[in-house]
Image: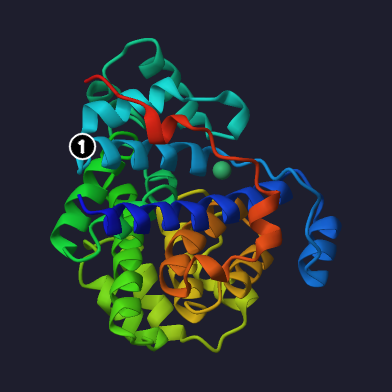
Amino acid sequence: MTDAALQRTLTSLEGLSIADSLGGFFEGFGASSIHFYIHSRQLPNPPWHFTDDTNMALSVVSILRQCGEIHQDKLARSFGEHFDSTRGYGLGARALLSRIQLGAYWRSLASEMFGGAGSYGNGGAMRVAPIGAFFANDLGAVVKNARLSAEITHSHLEGIAGAVAVAVAAAIAVQSREKGYSPPHRAFLEQVIVHVPEGKVRQGILKAIEIGEKVEVKSAAEILGNGSFISAQDTVPFALWNAARHLDNYEEAIWTTLSAGGDADTTAAIVGGIVVLYAGLDSIPQAWRERREPLPAWYLEETTPE
Ligand SMILES: [Mg+2]
């Protein structure tokens, strides 16, 4: 791995985790408070606690740092070891990760979920942008490693497709920045969709291309979803639609994402992990960076056994 790959990966993690922690703040709020903060763009008081999106992304980054690729057994072990019930994990993830923590083998558990169909939740997508950053110049490796990272908890086709789409979008953001090319909304999404397998996530991204960037956020969320059903297909198309509209403006990208409500920490985490790769680390306001609680040291230090 190169230093540049690791730096990009950490940049994506920063964009992801700050957006997640701001989004997570609104989860416990009533609608009128959310409306007040978002429309006045007032920052909640610190500390902003990160949620499961970031906590699992830390494991992804840790394994990339250690192995230079996604090693599924090690990633499953890291997910289990760092499972923290205070971080807002979904019910399925809770059941799965607490069993992995007790020593169960992930491969038999993940495909047993949901009557053998596997999960199509948005959890594979929420933590995957750093993989797109890491392998940015090799889209084949992006797709392969995104898939491997999702399968541990989200073995359903849609769960995997959501992760692939987000990771590819992150890679395209890096490539665009490196070329000094500002991709139009449609062109950005068209570059992503080439790599997304058939299914509802893909259909949602097609719809995102079709409605175009000028539609109001609220209407786009009504058409594409806002994560309310916490499925990949209900989350990823909207997040990509909005990331593509604000690739050069992290702050605007996150506020507008949050304004759609729904699974706001996750839609924001996805958007933040992608947009920061194009807009750059400096695009994250200093006041936001100071408010997020510090990330733990383990993801830069741990050695994960198989
Ligand atoms: Mg969360």
Dot 1 alpha-carbon crowd within 10 angstroms: few under 14, some 14 to 19, many 20 or more: some
> Which of 56 and 223 lies nearest the eye of the viewer?
56
Q: Give the residue drawn at x 16%, y 63%.
A: 138
Element at badge 1? helix
Q: Give the residue drawn at x 38%, y 30%.
A: 301
- The colour scheme used to paint the residues is rainbow
Question: Which quarter of the rendered picture does the C terminus lie within?
Answer: top left
Q: Give the residue drawn at x 53%, y 52%.
A: 266
- Look at mark 1 in the image and give the residue it sits on: 67
Q: Position of residue 130 (x, y in %)?
A: 36, 53
Q: Position of residue 157 (x, y in %)?
A: 26, 49
Q: Position of residue 291 (x, y in %)?
A: 70, 50
Q: Is residue 44 left or right of residue 203?
A: right
Say if 261 sits above or below 101 in the image: below
Give the quadrant of ligand 1: top right
Q: Quadrant of residue 164?
A: bottom left
**One can see residue 191 in this view:** yes
**One can see residue 155 in this view:** no
